[in-house]
Image (cartoon, rainbow, N blue to C red):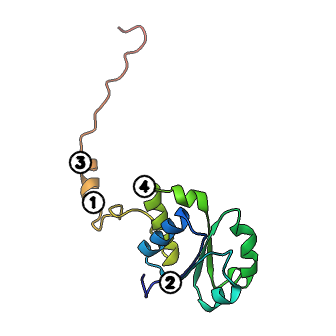
Amino acid sequence: MHESGPRVVLLSRPGGARERLRAALNEAGAHLVLDADPTQLDAPTLEAAQPQMVLVVLDAMTEPAIERFDSVLLDPAIEVMFEEADVAAKREGWDAARWIRHLSAKLHRRSDVLPPGTEPDSEPRAAVRKFVTSAPVAQAEPEPAPGNT
Protein backbone atom coordinates (compact mmCIF):
# COMPACT_ATOMS: atom_id res chain seq x y z
CA MET A 1 0.00 0.00 0.00
CA HIS A 2 1.25 3.48 -0.89
CA GLU A 3 0.44 5.96 1.88
CA SER A 4 1.33 8.92 -0.34
CA GLY A 5 -0.79 7.86 -3.31
CA PRO A 6 -4.38 8.90 -3.97
CA ARG A 7 -6.94 7.52 -1.50
CA VAL A 8 -8.83 4.78 -3.34
CA VAL A 9 -11.78 2.57 -2.45
CA LEU A 10 -12.22 -0.73 -4.29
CA LEU A 11 -15.82 -1.92 -4.38
CA SER A 12 -15.85 -5.50 -5.57
CA ARG A 13 -17.29 -8.83 -4.60
CA PRO A 14 -14.74 -11.55 -3.72
CA GLY A 15 -13.12 -13.31 -6.66
CA GLY A 16 -10.50 -13.11 -9.35
CA ALA A 17 -11.44 -9.61 -10.53
CA ARG A 18 -11.08 -8.23 -7.02
CA GLU A 19 -7.66 -9.84 -6.56
CA ARG A 20 -6.36 -8.58 -9.91
CA LEU A 21 -7.67 -5.06 -9.38
CA ARG A 22 -6.29 -4.88 -5.85
CA ALA A 23 -2.86 -5.82 -7.25
CA ALA A 24 -3.25 -3.33 -10.13
CA LEU A 25 -4.13 -0.51 -7.71
CA ASN A 26 -1.09 -1.34 -5.60
CA GLU A 27 1.17 -1.40 -8.66
CA ALA A 28 -0.32 1.91 -9.87
CA GLY A 29 0.59 3.58 -6.57
CA ALA A 30 -2.86 3.86 -4.98
CA HIS A 31 -3.39 4.20 -1.24
CA LEU A 32 -6.14 1.60 -0.81
CA VAL A 33 -8.21 2.92 2.11
CA LEU A 34 -11.11 0.47 1.78
CA ASP A 35 -11.58 -2.81 -0.06
CA ALA A 36 -15.17 -3.94 0.38
CA ASP A 37 -17.97 -5.99 -1.09
CA PRO A 38 -20.58 -3.44 -2.22
CA THR A 39 -23.41 -5.87 -1.49
CA GLN A 40 -22.33 -5.89 2.18
CA LEU A 41 -21.02 -2.33 2.67
CA ASP A 42 -23.06 0.53 4.13
CA ALA A 43 -22.89 4.10 2.81
CA PRO A 44 -21.53 5.69 6.04
CA THR A 45 -18.50 3.37 5.98
CA LEU A 46 -17.76 4.35 2.38
CA GLU A 47 -18.14 8.05 3.21
CA ALA A 48 -15.87 7.70 6.26
CA ALA A 49 -13.06 6.35 4.05
CA GLN A 50 -12.88 9.79 2.36
CA PRO A 51 -11.79 8.46 -1.03
CA GLN A 52 -10.38 10.54 -3.84
CA MET A 53 -11.26 7.73 -6.25
CA VAL A 54 -13.67 4.80 -6.18
CA LEU A 55 -13.18 1.80 -8.45
CA VAL A 56 -16.45 -0.13 -8.79
CA VAL A 57 -16.25 -3.64 -10.20
CA LEU A 58 -19.57 -4.38 -11.86
CA ASP A 59 -21.37 -7.70 -12.03
CA ALA A 60 -25.01 -8.76 -11.83
CA MET A 61 -25.07 -8.55 -8.01
CA THR A 62 -23.15 -5.28 -7.70
CA GLU A 63 -25.10 -3.08 -10.11
CA PRO A 64 -28.31 -2.87 -8.03
CA ALA A 65 -26.33 -2.45 -4.79
CA ILE A 66 -24.37 0.66 -5.75
CA GLU A 67 -27.36 3.04 -5.76
CA ARG A 68 -27.04 3.47 -2.02
CA PHE A 69 -23.56 4.98 -2.55
CA ASP A 70 -24.79 7.88 -4.71
CA SER A 71 -23.69 10.45 -2.12
CA VAL A 72 -20.08 9.44 -2.85
CA LEU A 73 -20.31 8.25 -6.47
CA LEU A 74 -22.02 11.45 -7.63
CA ASP A 75 -19.63 13.78 -5.77
CA PRO A 76 -17.76 15.74 -8.48
CA ALA A 77 -14.64 15.85 -6.29
CA ILE A 78 -14.34 12.06 -6.38
CA GLU A 79 -13.08 10.23 -9.46
CA VAL A 80 -15.21 7.14 -10.16
CA MET A 81 -14.18 4.28 -12.43
CA PHE A 82 -16.31 1.31 -13.40
CA GLU A 83 -14.81 -1.99 -14.48
CA GLU A 84 -16.58 -5.15 -15.67
CA ALA A 85 -15.74 -8.06 -13.36
CA ASP A 86 -15.46 -10.65 -16.12
CA VAL A 87 -13.15 -8.41 -18.19
CA ALA A 88 -10.92 -7.61 -15.20
CA ALA A 89 -10.65 -11.27 -14.22
CA LYS A 90 -9.44 -12.27 -17.69
CA ARG A 91 -7.04 -9.39 -18.37
CA GLU A 92 -3.41 -10.54 -18.46
CA GLY A 93 -0.08 -9.91 -20.14
CA TRP A 94 0.16 -6.88 -22.38
CA ASP A 95 -3.49 -5.91 -21.77
CA ALA A 96 -3.00 -5.98 -18.00
CA ALA A 97 0.17 -3.88 -18.20
CA ARG A 98 -1.53 -1.36 -20.49
CA TRP A 99 -4.54 -1.11 -18.17
CA ILE A 100 -2.27 -0.53 -15.15
CA ARG A 101 -0.51 2.31 -17.02
CA HIS A 102 -3.86 3.92 -17.78
CA LEU A 103 -5.01 3.42 -14.18
CA SER A 104 -1.80 4.98 -12.88
CA ALA A 105 -2.18 7.95 -15.24
CA LYS A 106 -5.74 8.49 -14.06
CA LEU A 107 -4.78 8.12 -10.38
CA HIS A 108 -1.93 10.59 -10.64
CA ARG A 109 -3.64 12.87 -13.19
CA ARG A 110 -1.01 12.34 -15.88
CA SER A 111 -1.36 11.81 -19.60
CA ASP A 112 1.71 9.60 -20.13
CA VAL A 113 0.27 6.15 -20.75
CA LEU A 114 2.93 4.70 -23.04
CA PRO A 115 5.29 2.01 -21.76
CA PRO A 116 8.83 2.92 -20.64
CA GLY A 117 11.23 3.37 -23.54
CA THR A 118 8.81 5.30 -25.73
CA GLU A 119 9.83 8.72 -24.42
CA PRO A 120 10.93 11.24 -27.06
CA ASP A 121 14.68 11.64 -27.53
CA SER A 122 16.14 14.46 -25.48
CA GLU A 123 18.49 15.48 -28.32
CA PRO A 124 17.13 17.19 -31.43
CA ARG A 125 16.89 15.09 -34.54
CA ALA A 126 19.44 17.32 -36.36
CA ALA A 127 21.75 14.40 -37.08
CA VAL A 128 18.94 12.53 -38.82
CA ARG A 129 17.90 15.63 -40.79
CA LYS A 130 21.55 16.22 -41.82
CA PHE A 131 21.85 12.63 -43.04
CA VAL A 132 18.61 12.82 -44.99
CA THR A 133 19.39 16.17 -46.62
CA SER A 134 22.96 15.23 -47.56
CA ALA A 135 22.10 11.87 -49.10
CA PRO A 136 22.37 11.78 -52.89
CA VAL A 137 19.08 11.77 -54.70
CA ALA A 138 18.74 9.23 -57.47
CA GLN A 139 17.75 10.72 -60.79
CA ALA A 140 15.43 8.74 -62.98
CA GLU A 141 16.35 8.57 -66.65
CA PRO A 142 13.78 10.28 -68.85
CA GLU A 143 11.35 8.07 -70.69
CA PRO A 144 12.09 7.87 -74.43
CA ALA A 145 9.58 9.66 -76.61
CA PRO A 146 7.07 7.39 -78.31
CA GLY A 147 8.46 6.14 -81.58
CA ASN A 148 12.15 6.74 -80.54
CA THR A 149 13.18 3.29 -79.43
Q: Residues within 10 Å of mark 1 (few under 14, many from 20)?
A: few
**Circle 1 is placed at which residue position?**
126
As shown in the figure, which amino acid type bears the numbered disc 3?
A: Ser
Question: What element does badge 3 sit on?
Answer: helix
Question: What element does badge 1 sit on?
Answer: helix
Residue 147 shows up from this direction = yes
The label nearer to you, 4 versus 3, is 4
Q: For residue 20, which numbered disc appears in the image?
A: none
As shown in the figure, which amino acid type bears the numbered disc 1?
A: Ala
Query: Left or right: where does residue 92 sit relative to residue 122?
Result: right
Distance CA(mark 2)–CA(mark 4): 25 Å
The residue furthest bottom is: 48
Sequence-wise, the earlier of marks 4 and 3 is 4
Asked if the residue at tag 3 contacts the one at tag 4, i.e. Cβ–Cβ closer than 8 Å, the answer is: no
**Residue 29: image location, x then y, percent:** 43, 78
Distance CA(mark 1)–CA(mark 4): 34 Å
**Circle 2 is placed at which residue position?**
6
